[in-house]
């Protein structure tokens, strides 16, 4: 398993817009090749961390054109450009149970 760690900051007045955008685009997010699951985390300042779990490194890299298209749609809601880092997953027992938190 392989992971993409994405970080970005949502503009303070756009947090609810981002939640609505995520809900409306969930199917497109899951259409990334090799994506097993993902989790989005946000602190009270609007800093987001997204951990996306993929079958392997090739799948994570192959998804980047689709991810960049999604990022471009989010541009009005975020400060700057999201960054991505790729990591080997060394432990992930029972990763993700399908629970979505609002």
Image: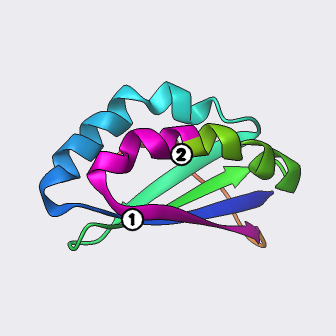
- Is the residue under label 1 in contact with that under label 2 (CB below 8 Å)? no
Image quadrant in which you'd find residue 102:
top left
- Residue 59 appears at what percent x and percent y? 81, 45
The magenta stretch is 69-88
Do we see residue 49 in this rendering?
no
Residue at 58% in and 45% down: 68
| Neighbourhood count class around disc 1 (C-alpha, 10 Å): few under 14, some 14–19, many 20 upward | few
Q: CA distance from mark 2 to mark 1?
A: 32 Å
- Residue 62 appears at what percent x and percent y? 79, 43
On whether residue 71 falls in the magenta region, the answer is yes
Q: Kindly identify which residue carries mark 1.
A: 80
Compared with 88, 52 (above or below) is above
Q: Nearer the viewer, residue 94 or 39?
A: 39
Q: For the residue labelled by badge 2, is the local secondary structure a helix, a strand or a loop?
A: loop
Mark whose residue sits in front, 2 or 1: 1
Image quadrant in which you'd find residue 23:
top left
- Residue 3 appears at what percent x and percent y? 70, 61
- Decide which of tag 2 and tag 1 comes sooner along the chain: 1
- Residue 81 appears at what percent x and percent y? 46, 61
| Image colouring | rainbow
Determine which of the numbered discs, if any, sits on residue 97 in the image.
2
Compared with 45, 66 (above or below) is above
Compared with 68, 95 (above or below) is below
Do we see residue 74 in this rendering?
yes
């Amino acid at each position: 398993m392989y992971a993409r760690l994405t970080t970005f900051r949502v503009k303070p007045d756009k947090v609810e817009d981002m939640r609505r955008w995520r809900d409306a685009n969930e199917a497109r997010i899951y259409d990334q090749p090799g994506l097993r699951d993902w989790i989005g985390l946000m602190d009270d300042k609007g800093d987001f961390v997204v951990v996306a779990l993929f079958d392997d490194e090739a799948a994570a890299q192959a998804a980047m054109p689709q991810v960049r298209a999604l990022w471009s749609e989010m541009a009005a809601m975020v400060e700057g450009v999201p960054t991505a880092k790729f990591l080997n997953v060394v432990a992930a027992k029972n990763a993700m149970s399908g629970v979505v938190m609002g």
